[in-house]
Amino acid sequence: MTITFYKTNSQGETRYYTIHDRQGSLFNLYCVTTLWGGSTHSGREKVYTFNTETERDRKIREICRSKIRSGYKVLYSFSRKPAYKEMFKKFSIKIG
């Protein structure tokens, strides 16, 4: 799963915020990595780890809602998991 948000600030610079669930921790089965900055492939990074899939999914929804509220729009999303596809679709509709 990955979803990338973007927004343009008052100086005309584009900022990106990406969330993905690739395994970023050797010690927890469930994790989410966020990456943000002026590029889609570099910037600051934070890894969240969870004990359950439910906790992980709750955090993903929380982050997505926060980004939408702060003016970000969906640039790209991909998931093989139907629940994520549906969630991304809802966020895209709210923006559009």
Image (spheres, helix red, strand yellow):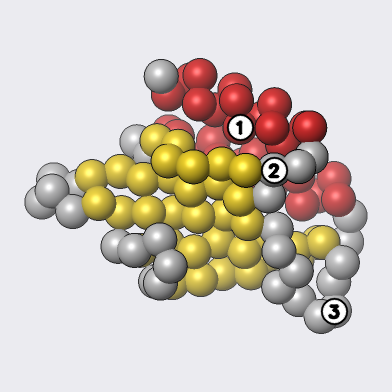
Q: Give the percent coordinates (x, y) of residue 21.
A: 70, 58
Amino acid type at circle 2 is: Ser
Q: Which residue is mark 3?
A: 27
Residue at the bottom extreme, as displayed: 26
Name the front one of labels 3 and 1. Answer: 1
Structural distance between the alpha carbons of marks 1 and 2: 9 Å
- Image coordinates for residue 17, horizontal then vertical, percent: 44, 54
Question: Which element type, helix, strand or loop, lies under badge 2?
Answer: loop
**Is residue 63 or residue 84 the one in the foreground?**
84
Specify the amino acid type for callout 1. Answer: Phe
* Residue 88 image label: 1
Q: Which mark is residue 79?
A: 2
Picture disc at residue 11: none
Residue 17 vs residue 2: left or right?
Answer: left
Compared to 86, does 16 lie above or below? below
Q: Residue 70: in sight, yes or no?
A: no
Contact between marks 1 and 2 (CB within 8 A): the answer is yes
Nearest to N terminus: mark 1 or mark 2: 2
Q: Amino acid at mark 3?
A: Phe
Q: Are marks 3 and 1 in contact (CB under 8 Å)?
A: no
Task: Classify 12 as above or below 25.
Answer: above
Is 11 left, or right, of 89 in this rendering?
Answer: left
Q: How far apart, in angstroms, are the residues tagged by discs 3 and 1?
A: 28 Å
Give the total number of marks visible in the rendering.
3
Looking at the image, residue 51 sits to the left or right of residue 72; the answer is right
Front of the two marks 2 and 3: 2
Q: What separation in Å lies between label 2 and label 3 (alpha carbons)?
A: 23 Å
Image position, residue 73 (x, y; %): 40, 35
